[in-house]
Image (spheres, rainbow, N blue to C red):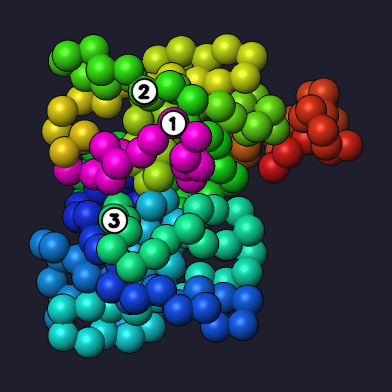
Amino acid sequence: MFTGLVEDVGIVAAAQRRSDALVLTVRPKSIKVADLALGESISHDGVCLTVTERHGDTFTVLAGAETLSKTTLGRLRVGSKVNLERALRMGDRLGGHWVSGHVDGTGELALRRDMGANVILGVRCPAPLLRYIVAKGSIALCGVSLTVNTVDATSFAVAIIPHTWTHTSLGDLHIGDPVNLEVDLLAKHVEKLLGGHLPPAAGNEEPYV
């Protein structure tokens, strides 16, 4: 589990295709590679991946076919920035919200507006995910825990404060870029428990879970 509070912005040092998977070598800025344990989980732009190797100032993870089909990781290239967060430990403060690192799908950046004190990002979102997004609720955007400002029939908007803008990779996003989305776990569990009492999500015969 994660909180969506980004610890570090790493740089992709190598990105190698291996059959239907992608092997990423990442160089963190502030996370000490020597402190990482083989097998531990780290969120990469909101995607939970397992550390498989350590080499000096870099570590390696592997993203499989399912992960690549559901996330933006397949677009990463050498030099790309990636938001990093190590998994929660017992007793840690929960400053963001519960984030599993299991991305539900991708949206598309449709708006980027500088308001002076903050930057507004508007994200076009697939209907099966939009049903779980509510104003003042939580959303993980590229692994960053954010509060939803507004929601309409096709998209939602969030406000990015200067600290988040400069300490994550969100500042590198451009209109049309895909973004990883993880909706609130609670909403999905509530829908599952209610079972057939809710209408199906748009484009699905069964409720999206």
Question: Real-space Cα distance between discs 1 and 3?
Answer: 17 Å
Q: How many residues crowd around disc 1 within 10 Å: few (fewer than 14), some, or many (20 or more)?
A: few
Q: Earlier in the sequence, mark 1 or mark 3?
A: 3
Q: Earlier in the sequence, mark 3 or mark 2?
A: 3
Label 2 close to label 1 by CB (< 8 Å):
yes
Direction from residue 186 to residue 113 in the image, left or right: left
In x, y percent, where is residue 74?
Answer: 51, 62
Q: Residue at position x 38%, y 83% from top?
A: 52
In depth, the one of 122 and 172 nearer the eye is: 172
In x, y percent, where is residue 20?
Answer: 63, 76
- Residue type indicated by callout 1: Ile
- Residue 153, above or below 107: above
Q: Quadrant of residue 36?
A: bottom left
Q: How many residues crowd around disc 3 within 10 Å: few (fewer than 14), some, or many (20 or more)?
A: many
| Element on which disc 2 rests | strand
- Residue type indicated by callout 2: Arg
Q: Residue at position x 24%, y 44% from top?
A: 168
Q: How many residues crowd around disc 2 within 10 Å: few (fewer than 14), some, or many (20 or more)?
A: some
Q: Earlier in the sequence, mark 2 or mark 1?
A: 2
Question: Real-space Cα distance between discs 2 and 1?
Answer: 7 Å
Which residue bears the numbered disc 1? 175
In depth, the one of 108 and 65 nearer the eye is: 108
Label 3 close to label 2 by CB (< 8 Å):
no
Which residue bears the numbered disc 2? 112
- Residue 57, above or below 43: below
Q: Decide whether residue 179 is among the magenta residues.
A: yes
Which residue bears the numbered disc 3? 81
- Residue type indicated by callout 3: Lys
Range of the magenta residues?
Answer: 167-181
Residue 87 in view of the camera = no
Q: Residue at position x 79%, y 28% from top?
A: 202
